[in-house]
Amino acid sequence: MAGARSKIMDLSIVIPALNEGENLKTLLPEIRKSIAALALESEILVVTQDRDPLTDEAAAASGARVIKQVERGYGGALLAGFATAGGAYILTMDADFSHQPSFIRDLWAARDRAEVTIASRYCPGGSARMPLGRFLLSRVLNVVFGRGLSLATRDFSSGFRLYKSPVVRDESFESCDFNILQEILVRAYARGWRVAEVPFAYTPRRHGSSNARIIRFGLAYMRTFLKLWKYRNSIQSADYDDRAYNSPIVFQRLWQRKRCRHVGDLIAGQGRVLDVGCGSSRIIGLLPPGSVALDILLPKLRYSRKFSQWLVRGSALQLPFRDGLFPCVLCSEVIEHLPRESAVLAELERVLAPGGRLVLGTPDYGRWEWRAIERIYEKVVPGGYAEEHVGHYTKGDLIRHFQARGYVHEETRTIFRGEMILAFRKKG
């Protein structure tokens, strides 16, 4: 008879603890009590830089493991915990009783709402009892990160969080201090993970003093913000296309909205659509029922769950569908990223049903307007697409290509005389 399959651990609790032995003596038994009420397979990892007898004694009494961190600082402690944790979920909390163990139940109950769940002091229903100066600094920090990075999260600096393990286990982080909390959240957004907040009442620590140093960490936060701003506004961010619809750059915002309007008009009434290279564009939300949105980048698809459409991960060079399956095929802003000799156009034709419509959008390199726009775009939008275009097409190129294959050119739309969106009809 085959041996019994070992049960996957539900939860790992990671506690950075620098000289917190006095607090841990009381905290760890209370954590055990909260976990027992949830009937979870779990482990407690106490992470410290310098092991001390009090910490070892408290951990041993509650069946916790003490992990010695390699990298310095609070960030180094979290990284050591993430690397060691074996749970499907990872919960992080402080050792000083500012994070009440009883609240673990609230975070666990909210785990299906998102891949990152934050015990939030600043979302509706949350509160923070701390000295006025620290409270104001904390609020300013969170407002700057939230508004500056166009994120809806209110509490970026709460370390009381529940993560689905792939969010942190499969990522690399650069920050070593408390600024790792902001970096984790921004990278989670950029990878398409969902973030939710649960209202939480924060109270001061019971024993000892905080290990935060305002001036040193303030400078680190500034450097982190600038680095994350560049990352957040680059094409690496899963919601890049969606955010462009409301971009603070007026030209980019108008461009995206015109594209959505033109594409929406051209696919209307054509039946179900295959959107090849969908990204995170709001065009996905315009697709009729039964449509499929395809992209090769998993973070984009994770983010695009919000549109409630069928999502498929696949390559435009080898579409995972049978011949003639879709009455309408859409491919917007994709073919210019692939060599002209690639199979992308042939694949679009293959999956399009006889008599179906092909809607194809790409920059028009036959016009001086696009070439000028590309150079400006490269300067204005950090990490933008400008330098990634390897296949350069003109309107005449595409019309000749498809007419030679029996297609009828039905319509052309343009955006600021730079981008062309062409509609072709396949012979029936």
Image (spheres, rainbow, N blue to C red):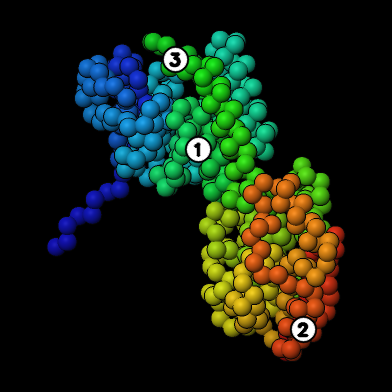
* Label 3 CA crowd tier, 10 Å (few <14, some 14–19, many 20+): few
Q: Residue at x 28, y 31 (%)?
A: 67
* Viewer-side residue, 11 vs 333: 333
> On the image, which quarter does residue 57 sit in?
top left
Query: Relative to residue 417, is residue 114 depicted above or below?
Result: above
Q: Report which residue position mark 1 lands on.
A: 184
> On the image, which quarter does residue 131 sit in?
top right
* Label 1 CA crowd tier, 10 Å (few <14, some 14–19, many 20+): many
Q: Is residue 175 left or right of residue 303?
A: left
* Label 2 CA crowd tier, 10 Å (few <14, some 14–19, many 20+): few
Location of residue 424 in the rendering, given as x and y in whole percent from the top left corner: 77, 79
Q: Residue at x 83, y 67 (%)?
A: 367
Q: Report which residue position mark 2 lands on.
A: 400
The amino acid type found where label 1 is placed reads Ile
Earlier residue among tags 2 and 1:
1
> On the image, which quarter does residue 21 sit in?
top left
Q: Dot 2 lies on which element?
A: helix
